[in-house]
Image (tube, coloured by chain):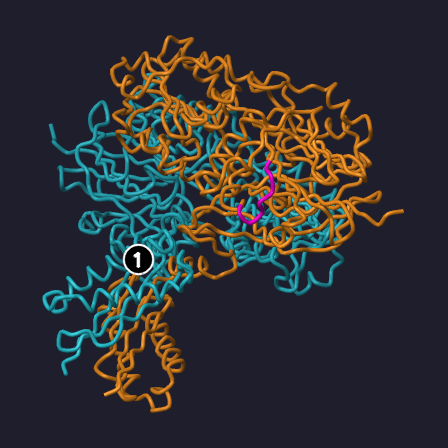
Chain colours: A cyan, B orange
Amino acid sequence: MSSDRLIYLPLGGAGEIGMNAYVYGYGQPGKERLILVDLGVTFPDMDTTPGVNLIMPDISWLEENADRLEAIFITHAHEDHVGAVGRLYSKLKAPIHARPFTRHHAQRKLEEAGQVPEAVIAAGVYPQVIDAGPFKISFLPLSHSIPESSGLIIDTPAGRIVHTGDFKLDTTPVLGDPFDEDLWREIAKPGVKALVCDSTNVFSPYDGRSEASVGAPLRDLVKSAPNMFVATTFASNVARVKQLAEAGEAAGRSVCLLGRAMRRMIQAGVETGVLGDFPKTVTVEDARDIPRGNLMLIVTGSQGERRAASAQLSRGKYLGMTLKEGDMFLFSSKTIPGNERGVGRIMNAYSEMGVDVVAESDQYHVSGHANRPDLQRVHEIINPQMVIPMHGEHRHLREHAKLAEQAGRKSLVVVNGAVCDLTGDAPHVVEHVEADRIYLDGDILIGAMDGIVRDRIRLALNGHVIVNVIVENDEPLGEPWVELMGLPEIGLSRAPLVDVLEEDLGQFLMRAGDKTLRDDDKLGEELKRIARKTANEEIGRKPEVTVVVSRLEG
Amino acid sequence: MSSDRLIYLPLGGAGEIGMNAYVYGYGQPGKERLILVDLGVTFPDMDTTPGVNLIMPDISWLEENADRLEAIFITHAHEDHVGAVGRLYSKLKAPIHARPFTRHHAQRKLEEAGQVPEAVIAAGVYPQVIDAGPFKISFLPLSHSIPESSGLIIDTPAGRIVHTGDFKLDTTPVLGDPFDEDLWREIAKPGVKALVCDSTNVFSPYDGRSEASVGAPLRDLVKSAPNMFVATTFASNVARVKQLAEAGEAAGRSVCLLGRAMRRMIQAGVETGVLGDFPKTVTVEDARDIPRGNLMLIVTGSQGERRAASAQLSRGKYLGMTLKEGDMFLFSSKTIPGNERGVGRIMNAYSEMGVDVVAESDQYHVSGHANRPDLQRVHEIINPQMVIPMHGEHRHLREHAKLAEQAGRKSLVVVNGAVCDLTGDAPHVVEHVEADRIYLDGDILIGAMDGIVRDRIRLALNGHVIVNVIVENDEPLGEPWVELMGLPEIGLSRAPLVDVLEEDLGQFLMRAGDKTLRDDDKLGEELKRIARKTANEEIGRKPEVTVVVSRLEG
């Protein structure tokens, strides 16, 4: 008997919704040949990552073992699955397999990062097989909320794995392949060792709804609007954008796409052949001359992104277009938790303009993820030996594991960095590797633990005091000089805070002994301590303090 | 005919959910005698107000006209209605009227701010009348989500105003007075000029649910829990806390209240007589010795507040209590938009401990605000000449106004700072006064527009570069010195960012002409420009830059 083993190691996506990166390995322990499934990003927020541009998985473990990496597979073109390919490819350099629509986006990411786009190879679908070391992989077409979403059938010497990617069970998905139960049963037939499965909607107890179900309500709504109609949705939800455009066409409206991502996605759909019959659109230049009642805009920014078209229009004119009283604005989307304030700002701005906003309605949006009953159905169809929940925060993974266990299946919550051995009858974690986050900060990749962002959060919460002292021949030269940023100018004593700080620091300097004055560290520490104490007395807050000591030799 | 007029002027709460402060006036234009209804706070967030402690309405207009202010009325003890009383009372100095439970809290706010608590006078309820200049005011008991919530019946020479405060129509509110339709009809009978009405739930199309409806589900849930049961809710929702405690008692559990606000609220309820028969509780010291299966904790922190008991317990031991695998944690609450991330963090931390979290379930929580059908019902019962929506973001106010207009009533969206004349047949805005926000920042009150918080946001997004230059007799002395905070240490050229900045700034200084070196402003501007340009080349970001030029005379 061989001691080869089959391992599963999430480096992202198992403990968060976003930043997906899942490693599978097969071979002798520590020498397994590897494949990577997805390489996505997640997005920063002011609470935890102010100023950060993008958040990516820390793939340093994979980088160290890049010689063992056979190939990378991208399940679909959402940013949380493909977004880090450009920035991180140079650390891995393995061939990337993706279906044409996804490939289109992965190639653009590589080009933007100065890499050769040829690294991405166009993949066919099951029963076509891609060989990658000990693995044989097929793309399984399924429905989600972007064209050509796929699961992966991963055959290994230790058995078959079905990795769902993001999915729902939709028999009328508008675009792409409908859910085909017979196909899934065929895949299950040889026996499936592990179902590694999307957990996003495990808390949604209702049956999933089809993309097609929003068509008629959309047509009725667009028809009912007396003036201009504007809709936003995720640009990547090409089926939705198509349904919106068709609703516009059916109401006799000219359709104009606003926002770079929106135009790019539709173009990608046409170029890759996934989108055959998209209604004719007009340019924004032409749109300006069309009577408002005959016009429909489909725009980016359903999550309240400040620079997207929705937000720009809510602040006034955008590319010559302006919304007016009596226009209607539809969010054909769900607000992702954390984005409520940004979306709310836009809704209120439209309300001030007299625009009628339709939002948070199930009639005009369906989720792209399988709800709890659909997850149960997939467990039954695939009938795997074990269920490994992925694509979820810890609470989603845990609930999903409980769901599987309730049906008598083996399951385990495997979080980022946990190496899980799937070889035997039950999954078990055998070791942990580093799997934190890295930030794209401006143009630089920094570690989440580097303290750089922590310092920025401190500046935001506490403000900044800069103390400047000149020491000549170990004697203070003149008075200390203080600058403030982000702090009240006047404190409780009603005197300028700068003056009070300079006074207290000056007093200290006058009394300071030679030993302190000679020691930069000690002098800096003392000045910082006094500045914080004085500030706390004056304004009730201990600011961040930077002390600059300049030494002159006379 | 007199030219006296009746005005309504929201200074907070009309354009946000929070920070309520509504002025009514009657008399000659510009000389109206005034009353103020509520004086609340709203809460800061990292996106817009990092480091701010509390946000209050800018009442400078009212402060300037404090000699015309007859009295202040507080409808109920929620922070968004009473929270600014302590900090702002000294600017107004008018008597404050509140019912006993609300008074208890208002007095504590005054004491904490060093004011005399006697300023708050205990009010009875309708038909008792309080005289305040030309106004005659009665407190109308109604149900909300805190004891002794009240509307106000405000009689003026120009007619009766009904100001609802926050309310719902609950015939079984568990605590306090049930909705009494006959009483409301009696109040409406003389004719009501204006209904100034809560708009929070105008988008909720379903019938409101009673507080009593959560009792049975809570009892079943607590009974079903095999190990320790922990519940969180808004501490001020005393009826809910009572129902939770009763569910614990019914399941044979000892009940322990954790968190200062929780104990304070229950104590206030007992002391003011609103809470007669609260179950016996145990101290946390005693709780430690009680078997887990016989214990129930009711804790603060339903909104994910970092320092509240929920969050502390999710991070480990708190006051000797620890949650364990198999315990159950209930959020008997709704997550307020904007708090999703904080609440999610807690849920995931509990999930990691193996604690079963029950959250976001309508079974265990009901709203304290009237839904759309209930608002329509109140419009019908009160049958006012005009409906003025309040307590809502702009979109809530607008929707509420549309709802009233659809039923043939006059209505108008009146936002913070708008002086609305209610004297005639229809409301109309006659002028605007300053009505922004002020921040409690540490111990200091600062204006929202002062730029202080804007600077902190910039520091958080961009980081801070400090440039220190010494000029002696208009010649640079030595090299420039650079300090960084919140920025990557190494840039694209792989050299330390500090070194590259010092090099570029030094080059500039060497070449700088006398005119530049003599002019502090010009020198500072140039150094800042260069620092930003170099940083942008090195790290792809333009930081905030503070330049300190020290001048020596040799």
Task: Give me the residue at 53% from left, 41% from top.
Answer: B85
> How packed is label 1: few (under 14 Cα within 10 Å), some, or many (20 or more)?
many
* Residue A395, x across and y down, in percent: 36, 30
Most extreme residue toward the right is: B1
Chain identity of mark 1: A
| Front in this rendered view, residue B353 or A189 | B353
The amino acid type, in three-letter code, at marker 1 is: Thr
Q: Residue at coordinates 26% horizontally, 55% vertically from top-left? A: A93
Q: Quadrant of residue A446?
A: bottom left
The quadrant the N terminus of chain A occupies is: top left
Quadrant including the C terminus of chain A: bottom left
Q: Which residue is mark 1?
A: A534
Total numbered labels: 1
Q: Which residues are magenta?
A: B90-96
The answer to whether residue B319 of the structure is visible from this angle is yes
In what element is the residue under mark 1? helix
Q: Is residue B501 above or below residue A373?
A: below
A498 or B28: nearer the viewer = B28
Q: Is residue B93 magenta?
A: yes
Q: Quadrant of residue A500?
A: bottom left
x, y percentage for residue A506? 25, 68
Q: Nearer the viewer, residue B52 or B456?
A: B52
Quarter occupied by residue A289: bottom right
Q: Is residue A66 above or below residue B37?
A: below
Q: Position of residue B401 (x, y in %)?
A: 73, 40
User: Toward the viewer: A211 or B319?
Assistant: B319
Q: Horizontally, is B548 left or right of B377 in the view? A: left
Question: Residue at 37% of width from left, 14% of height from top?
Answer: B225
In this view of the protein, can residue A403 be seen by the observer? no
Q: Position of residue B460 (x, y in %)?
A: 38, 57
The residue at the far bottom in this view is: B514
Residue A470 sits above or below residue A225 on the image:
below
